[in-house]
Image (tube, helix red, strand yellow):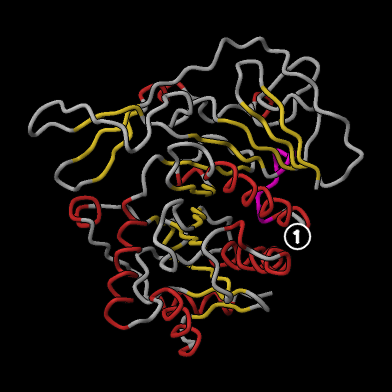
Amino acid sequence: MRRTSARLSDGREIIYFDEAEGRPEPPADPRGLPPHEAAPEARFDPLLREWVVMAAHRQGRTHLPPSDACPLCPSTPDRPTEVPAPDYDVVAFENRFPSLASGSGAGPEDALEAVGELEPSRRPAAGRCEVLCFSSDHRASFTDLPPERVRTIVDAWADRTAALSALPGVEQVFCFENRGAEIGVTLPHPHGQIYAYPFTTPRTERMLASAREYRERTGGDLLADNLAAERRAGLRVVAESGHWTAFVPAAARWPVEVHLYPRRRAGSLPELTAAERDDFAPFYLDLLGRLDRLFDAPLPYVAAWHQEPVHAEPGLAYLHLEVFSVRRAPGKLKYLAGSESGMGVFVNDVLPETTAQRLREAAQ
């Protein structure tokens, strides 16, 4: 794989990941955009002790454009886009409408602005948001990609995780894909996103705290032991390969929810071996195919990588991919209503064991 870094006309970085060496150097961005400026703000909720990002500039971001106006397609002579090249394999670039801004310059150790005794503390939402395009084909989806392309994407995820983790002030890197209008996707072109947060996210903090308490109490490894228990029981295991296991968690929150773990313990994507990356590609494509066959229609989903924060206590995090969907039946969606939205208590209408069995039966 060849990696080429360049700059868009407003100063944002763009990185091309080419599978072949023969592709010409990408052309310069001809658009003449003004310097990129964004000023999102992070406010601290003193009741839940969580950071909330305010990014009002995102109200004007591109929303469901027609296919001939897609900003993620390759550029043509008469229509320049976010990707200046006339074709590409995989490409990452800084988001034009970021939730976190790389130029704000504030790290988690910086003094907070105290607005009042009971008001949220504030600081610039430092960090970085990138778009990762999986293919130049506007009509494709991740499920349509060949294993070789998925392998390139895994390498790109690992590359960006390592690069963003090295930026000052970054505490956690989150790679994810949203698929489907039901999830809230505003650009149908096959792509994902990568967030480099200036703090450890609430869910990760809670998972690490659980792992720490379990280790202090039992001396064991919570996530590794949970994976081993699921494999022994087999009831909720969907599929296994030489290096990966996919299972529906016993306390699944979503009507469709599958977790993918490498069987060798790794904390982050850069730690995956070449063999594990090779094996992931066909394994994940097989799972996505099963998900689409579950209701005989493309499944809207979120695919979220959980990986070790930059300054995490060693041995607590365990890399895994969580794929979940809001669809609970053909034509029916799971809405976060009173209990979920108001109290954070999920009520699942589908037993995890039922979902696992149906996904096993959906194998080709």
Residue 15 lies, with reference to residue 156, above or below; the image says above
Q: Which residues are magenta?
A: 135-143
Q: Position of residue 30 (x, y in %)?
A: 73, 13
Front one among 184 and 343: 343
Dominant secondary structure of the residues highlighted in magenta in the image: loop
Residue 116 lies, with reference to residue 273, above or below; the image says above
Residue 318 lies, with reference to residue 162, above or below; the image says below
Q: Determine if the magenta segment contains residue 202.
A: no
Which quadrant of the rendered structure holds the C terminus? bottom right
Q: State left or right for residue 255 relative to residue 193.
A: left
Front one among 266 and 65: 266
Front one among 236 and 199: 199
Picture quadrant of residue 316: bottom left
Residue beneath label 1, please? 147
The number of numbered badges drawn on the structure is 1
Picture quadrant of residue 291: bottom right
Residue shown at 18%/55% (left/top)? 343
Residue shown at 55%/67% (left/top)? 266
Kind of residue at disc 1 = Pro
Q: State left or right for residue 317 relative to residue 154.
A: left
Q: Residues within 10 Å of mark 1 (few under 14, many from 20)?
A: some
Residue 310 lies, with reference to residue 320, above or below; the image says above
Picture quadrant of residue 347: bottom left
